[in-house]
Each structure stands twice: as structure tokens, then as C-alpha cells.
Image (cartoon, grey):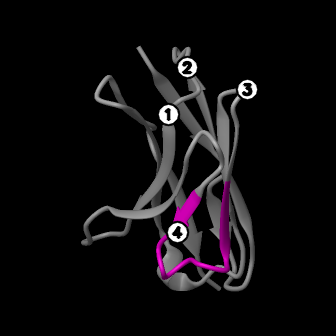
Amino acid sequence: QVQLVESGGGLVQPGGSLRLSCAASGIFSSNYVMYWYRQAPGKERELVASISRGGSTNYADSVKGRFAISRDNAKKTGSLQMNSLKPEDTAVYYCNVKLGGAVDAWGQGTQVTVSS
């Protein structure tokens, strides 16, 4: 069973930075795609960023140029570096890993609050 554990959320002032981390266990292949989603109160969950095994990345337009996703295939970890944070970035952030149709695992979520 694949398990994901996220860390790194918290309260930060507008313009500040946070780094979220995601550690995977129970997965024995690196051929997965890692995603970061977020869900703000009263809104649908939205895709923030993704990264393939080879390092190809995609970002939501709202975070391009501010967020950076990365991963370590050997350690089965990933991260989301968030810079120039805005109040509208406030949400619960979730790590997600998909491996074909065999794996679709989610972390428990970590709260990010951007407020002065």
C-alpha cells in the first residue's frame, strides 16, 4: 500500500516562501507522476503542478514563475517550493502519486495560510 506523508505547511506573510515536502513509501517503481493539488475553502480541488519521472514539469497558470516542483527518484520524495506567496494561495495542499492505473495515492494534506 502506497502512503504519502506531507510536511512544510504553515502561516506565512504575503510575499513569503514555503517549501512543501512529500515522502512516499510502499512504492517500488519510480515511473510515477507526482502531482500537487490544492483546495481552498468552498472551492474545488485544483491541480497546481506535476512532475514526471524524467523531470518534465507542468504548472497552473496561477503559480507559474512562483512555484517550483521537484523530486528525488532514489529517495521517493518530492517537494513544492512556493515563492512570492499571495493570500489566494491559501489552501490545503495535497501530494498525489499516480502510476498507470495501479496506483493513485494521496497524502493527508497540509495547510498553507498566507496572511498578514
Is the residue 91 above or below the residue 104 in the image? below
Q: Earlier in the sequence, mark 3 or mark 1?
A: 1
- Identify the magenta region: 57-69
Residue position for label 2? 29
Q: Residues within 10 Å of mark 3 (few under 14, many from 20)?
A: few
Query: The disc labelled 2 sits on which kind of residue?
Result: Ser
- SS at circle 2: loop
- SS at circle 3: loop
Q: Is 5 placed left or right of 48 in the picture?
A: right
Res 113 quadrant in image: bottom right
Query: The disc labelled 3 sits on which kind of residue?
Result: Lys
Task: Give me the C-alpha separation between circle 3 and circle 1.
Answer: 13 Å
Can you tell which mark lies on residue 49?
A: none
Q: Earlier in the sequence, mark 1 or mark 4?
A: 1
Whether label 1 touches label 2, CB < 8 Å = yes
Residue position for label 4? 59
Decide which of 109, 116 is in the foreground and name it: 109
At a point 59% along the width and 84% down the height, the residue shown is 86
Query: The disc labelled 4 sits on which kind of residue?
Result: Tyr
Q: Quadrant of the N terminus?
A: top left
